[in-house]
Image (tube, coloured by chain):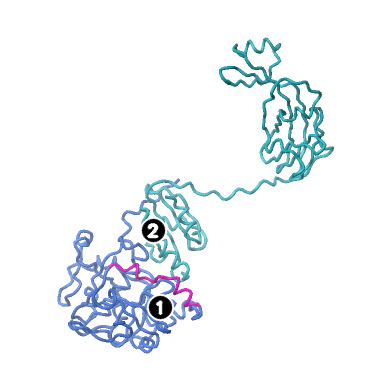
Amino acid sequence: MTFVNDLTVPDGYIAGCDKRECLLGSEFPVLENSMDLIPRAEWGDLATEYDGLESLESWTYDQRSEGSCASNSAAQAMEIAISSALGKERSVRLSAISLYTRVGRSAGSGSSIPSNISALAKKGILPLNTAENKKRFNHTHPATGFSARLPLGWETTAALFKATEWFDIASFEGIATALLKGYPVCYGRAGHAITAVKLERRGGEWCLKYKNSWGSNWGQNGHGWDTESFCSRSINSYGAYAVRCTKIDYALGDLPQVKEN
Amino acid sequence: MSHLTLLSRTAAVAMLLCGPLVAGEIAIKAPGEPLEVKEHVILPVSGIPEEALSSASVDITPSTGVTLIAAKSWTGEPFLLFQARKPGTYTITISLNGWIAGLDASTAKAEAALGGDILATQLRALVNRLILTYPLSKGSCLVEVAGEDDSPTPPPPVPVPEPGEKWVVLFRESSQQTPKQAKMYLTLRPQLEGKGHNLLIVDPDQVTKGTVLQAYLDLLEGDLPGVCLAAESGKILYSGSLPDNINDILQLVGE
């Protein structure tokens, strides 16, 4: 298996990415209008030199039998953005289902990427209920379980994990620019949402290396590839979003007070 | 300089004379008018027998930023080659020394034996004997140098690396981040964290007003990216523009 343009949904999983319901740029600035795109002629050198965002991943999300791929994709992008700012040691594993329960209609209904991103920007997301997170935060939540109710007062903890600045992306060139500049990108195609972490040249075509949310046994350590021609067709219908800024105050408790010299 | 016999490459080099000798009046011919900064000049020297040249000592005050070479021509005439990078008045002195060996008495007794003429005695213990050196004769001259100080400009001060864990708080405008910077930040993190330091890469939009992080951002003036380097105590070791390569950043942080 090469896991290129792979649309096979493994047994026990479902794809659940709805098409975008909002207009391009209606809620977040359009990347193509906000910065100069990196010319295609420069991609080769830059992509060769750049290892991509894989080193910032700390685990592989697993949505199991729920249609929460868009939530997992958004949570994965958010976590990478936090790791980029703070490092993996200070980053926190997130509960994608704490997002999906607010935007999905049922366990298998699916959701759109922009609805998840909007929820992340407005109210945030809860940390995963790991033993470490339970010690650190007042509210945590499991990785799966649409029917599990969010804990009372969850908003105060979720507010620590907001991704406040996003770019709406309209083109493959925009996704390539975002990745080369260090922004993770969640995007959808063929009814499934994933997180792009690297621009790569494979088989004579530009590809996005993405992190899936079907566990670490899927693909190559949870990664697959989409060719430009394959995912370009879907960008406008499903959307592609790059996360630029997240809240980080939760991790700054040990930052020393500035002492006047 | 291949035609010259080099006696000394630095100012203020002294050599011991291997036995007393008789010398005449030592003279150094100074230039008739002030020299320019960095101008080379040859100062002829007279009054030193050729066989005594190797025992002559040359001194100059002040000595900072000065090149002074003692040499002799093919015909055996001694001279000094002089150059100064700073304006000022320079005093050049040449002296010939004699020595007395075998004394086992105190310096006071030696002075008495020599009629109190020992100036600036140099006392050395050699094979359980005392050797006293003393000047036989000397001559000096003044050289005036005019113009602007041409000393090399010292590099900007580099913060002295402090031991221990440090915080590197790097501020950058994320929307203007270049691929080169993105790569540099990714590479930088494991190198700093591997040495036990902390790295925060922050966009000003991520800074909440009134927080500790705000105090770090307030230290920076000018364009981003900028960086604050703090000790674990919160003492600021550096704040300013971010060096544009990893090695310079690592050097800034130290071990």
- Membership of B249 in magenta stretch: no
Q: Which residue is mark 2?
A: B199
Within 10 Å of disc 2 (Cα), the crowding (few <14, some 14-19, many 20+) is many
Chain letter for the blue colouring in the rendering: A
**Apparent colour of chain B:** cyan
Q: Is residue B124 left or right of residue A194?
A: right
Q: Residue at x 23, y 79 (%)?
A: A68
Q: Nearer the viewer, residue A56 or B95?
A: B95
Q: What's under tag 2, amino acid-wise?
A: Leu
Q: Which residues are magenta?
A: A42-58
Number of the label disc, if any, that sits on residue B171: none
The quadrant in which the C terminus of chain A is found is: top left
Cα distance between the residues tagged 1 and 2: 28 Å
The image quarter containing residue A162 is: bottom left
Q: Nearer the viewer, residue A157 or A228?
A: A228
Within 10 Å of disc 1 (Cα), the crowding (few <14, some 14-19, many 20+) is many
Secondary-structure class at tag 1: strand
- Membership of A46 in magenta stretch: yes
Q: Residue at x 48, y 46 (%)?
A: B160
Q: Are marks 1 and 2 on the same chain?
A: no
Q: Which residue is mark 1?
A: A200
